[in-house]
C-alpha cells in the first residue's frame, strides 16, 4: 500500500524549481523518519495531480532521488523508499539546559547595540516599498546571470570554483576591474593594487582594521552611512563627525589631528550631495596638509543617469593617499556581496593578509560568474536598463513630492536611487514609519544616520529602486496623508 498522497505538500515559502522542491520534500520525509525503508511512494500521476504540477516534473524528481539512493524502483510496481536511504539519528532529544556562564563577564568586546536599522524581510510584499538598496527582479537579467553561473560551473572553470586561492582573487575579475571598471572613474591601477571583498561594507571594515588604532582619529561625514559609524566605533579609534553641507564634507571643518577621512563624494550618504571638483581638490589639499589618508566610498556611481559622473576623487590623487571602495552589490543585487578595494601596494598587501586570516578570499565560483557577466556585456546592458527605469521613477517621485507638498532635503545631481527627505519638525519619522507600515508603505527613518546625542528625528529616506513606477504616486499620497494625520494629532519629534 502506498503512502497517503495527502502527506505530501509543498511549502508556500519553498525556494528553487518545482522539481527541486519535490526532491527536498521527499528527502526530508525520509531523513525525519516519516517515510520508512520499503514504503511505497504514490505514483507519479497521482502525486502530480495532488500537487498541481506536471507528471514529468514528479518523474524527474523521482529519478534524481533514485540516482542518489533515496528511492528504489521495482519493475512496474513503482517507487519505494530505499533500504540504503539515509536514516534519521537514533538518539533522544537533548533536554533544555540553562547556561551557567555569566556572558556579561565572559564577552570581552561587544559588537551589538548599534543603531543600524533593519528592513522587513518581506519588504517586496508591501505595495509601496520606498526601501533603499534592494534588487528589482523586473530589471535584473536573471537568464544571463544563470547562464554565466552555469558556464562558471563547467569543466574548464573547475579550478576557479574549487581551488583555494589563499590570499589571491580570480584573475579574470581583477583584469576586468583594472581594464574596464576603474578607467570609467578615471582611475589607473595594477592588479597588485586591487583586492576583492565581500561587498563595500567588508572593504570598509578591512580598511578600518588596517589603518586605525585607539590612538588615531577618523573623520566621517554627519549624517553618514550608519554601518560605517559602527565599524569605526568598534575599532576604538577617536571618531570625529563633521557635519556636511550641500556639497558634502567641508575640508576646512576637518580637525587638525585627523589621520583618516571617510567620505562619499559622488553620492553623499544619505543626503545624495555630489561634491564639486573644486571641493574635491580642496579636500585632497587638506589631507595633504594633515598628512591624512582618504577613504572614498563610491558605492553608487553606476546610477548616474542624469549626467555623466564626476571623476572619482582617487583619479585626482597624485600622492597615493586615497583608498577607493567600489561595489557590485548596488548595480547587480545586494545578496551578491562582492566589492573591491583599490589602493597603494603597501596598503593592499596588509589588507590582503588580514582578509586571508579571516576568510581567505570570496568564493571563487561567485567571482568567476561575476567575471563572465561583466566581460560578456550583460552588466553594461543591465546598467543602461536600470538607468532608464530609475530616470522614469525619479521623475514620478519629483512630480509626487511636489504634488503632495513633501520636502526634499537632498537629491543627487547626477541621479542615484533615493531622496533624502525632511518632515515637519514636529514629526518623529520612526513613529511615522510604524504608522505607515500597516498601509503597505515602507520608508526609512533618518535618525540612525546622525551621530551624537541630539539626533534629528524628522528626516527620512525614500528609495525608488524597488517600487514600480505606477505605484509611486499613490504611495506618496499615503505618505503625505500619514504626515498630515500626525500633525493633526500633535505628535512631537525629539531632538
Image (cartoon, helix red, strand yellow):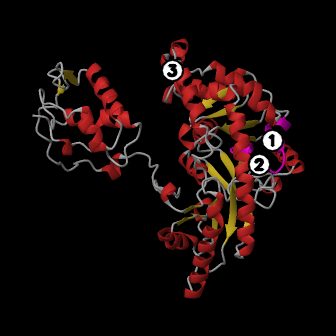
Quarter holding the N terminus? Answer: top left
From mark 1 to mark 3, how far is it between C-alphas? 38 Å
Secondary-structure class at tag 2:
loop
Question: Which residue is disc 2 drawn over?
Answer: 265
Proximity of marks 2 and 3: CB atoms separated by less than 8 Å: no
Q: Nearer the viewer, mark 2 or mark 3?
A: 3
Residue 225 % position (x, y): 63, 53
Q: Height in image: 236 above or below 181?
A: below
Who is closer to the viewer here, 260 or 86?
A: 86
Q: Which residues are magenta?
A: 297-317
Question: Which residue is disc 3 drawn over?
Answer: 153
Q: Height in image: 241 above or below 326?
A: below
Question: Which residue is disc 1 drawn over?
Answer: 313
Q: Earlier in the sequence, mark 2 or mark 3?
A: 3
Proximity of marks 1 and 3: CB atoms separated by less than 8 Å: no
Residue drawn at the location 65% of the way across and 44% of the way down: 216
Amino acid at each position: 500500500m502506498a503512502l497517503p498522497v495527502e502527506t505530501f505538500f509543498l511549502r508556500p515559502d519553498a525556494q528553487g524549481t518545482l522539481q527541486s522542491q519535490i526532491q527536498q520534500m521527499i528527502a526530508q520525509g525520509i531523513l525525519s523518519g516519516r517515510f520508512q525503508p520499503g514504503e511505497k511512494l504514490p505514483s507519479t500521476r497521482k502525486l502530480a495531480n495532488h500537487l498541481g504540477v506536471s507528471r514529468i516534473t514528479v518523474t524527474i524528481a523521482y529519478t534524481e532521488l533514485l540516482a542518489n539512493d533515496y528511492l528504489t524502483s521495482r519493475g512496474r510496481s513503482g517507487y519505494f523508499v530505499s533500504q540504503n536511504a539515509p536514516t534519521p539519528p537514533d538518539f533522544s532529544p537533548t533536554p533544555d539546559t540553562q547556561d551557567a556562564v555569566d556572558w556579561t563577564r565572559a564577552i570581552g568586546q561587544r559588537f551589538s547595540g548599534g543603531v543600524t536599522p533593519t528592513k522587513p524581510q518581506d519588504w517586496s510584499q508591501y505595495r509601496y516599498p520606498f526601501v533603499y538598496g534592494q534588487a528589482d527582479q523586473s530589471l535584473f537579467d536573471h537568464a544571463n546571470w544563470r547562464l554565466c553561473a552555469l558556464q562558471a560551473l563547467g569543466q574548464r572553470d573547475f579550478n576557479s570554483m574549487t581551488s583555494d586561492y589563499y590570499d589571491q582573487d580570480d584573475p579574470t575579475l581583477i583584469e576586468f576591474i583594472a581594464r574596464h571598471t576603474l578607467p570609467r572613474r578615471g582611475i589607473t591601477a595594477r592588479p597588485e593594487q586591487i583586492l576583492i571583498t565581500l561587498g563595500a561594507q567588508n572593504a570598509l571594515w578591512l580598511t578600518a582594521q588596517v589603518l586605525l588604532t585607539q590612538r588615531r582619529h577618523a573623520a566621517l561625514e554627519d549624517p553618514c552611512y550608519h554601518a560605517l559609524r559602527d565599524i569605526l566605533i568598534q575599532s576604538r579609534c577617536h571618531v570625529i563627525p563633521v557635519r556636511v553641507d550641500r556639497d558634502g564634507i567641508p575640508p576646512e571643518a576637518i580637525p587638525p589631528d585627523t589621520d583618516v577621512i571617510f567620505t562619499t563624494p559622488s553620492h553623499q550618504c544619505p543626503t545624495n550631495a555630489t561634491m564639486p571638483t573644486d571641493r574635491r581638490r580642496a579636500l585632497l589639499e587638506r589631507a595633504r596638509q594633515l598628512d591624512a589618508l582618504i577613504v572614498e566610498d563610491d558605492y553608487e556611481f553606476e546610477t548616474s543617469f542624469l549626467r555623466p559622473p564626476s571623476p572619482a576623487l582617487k583619479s585626482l590623487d597624485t600622492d597615493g593617499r586615497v583608498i577607493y571602495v567600489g561595489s557590485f552589490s548596488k548595480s547587480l543585487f545586494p545578496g551578491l556581496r562582492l566589492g573591491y578595494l583599490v589602493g597603494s601596494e603597501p596598503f593592499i598587501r596588509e589588507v590582503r593578509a588580514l582578509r586571508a586570516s579571516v576568510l581567505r578570499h570570496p568564493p571563487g565560483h561567485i567571482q568567476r560568474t561575476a567575471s563572465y557577466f561583466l566581460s560578456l556585456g550583460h552588466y553594461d546592458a543591465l546598467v543602461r536598463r536600470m538607468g532608464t527605469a530609475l530616470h522614469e521613477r525619479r521623475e514620478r517621485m519629483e512630480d509626487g513630492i511636489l504634488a503632495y507638498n513633501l520636502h526634499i532635503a537632498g537629491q543627487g545631481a547626477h541621479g542615484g536611487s533615493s531622496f533624502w527627505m525632511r518632515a515637519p519638525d514636529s514629526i518623529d519619522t520612526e513613529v511615522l514609519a510604524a504608522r505607515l507600515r500597516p498601509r503597505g508603505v515602507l520608508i526609512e527613518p533618518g535618525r540612525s544616520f546622525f551621530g551624537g546625542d541630539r539626533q534629528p528625528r524628522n528626516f527620512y529616506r525614500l528609495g525608488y529602486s524597488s517600487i514600480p513606477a505606477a505605484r509611486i504616486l499613490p504611495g506618496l499620497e499615503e505618505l503625505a496623508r500619514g504626515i498630515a494625520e500626525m500633525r493633526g494629532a500633535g505628535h512631537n519629534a525629539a531632538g
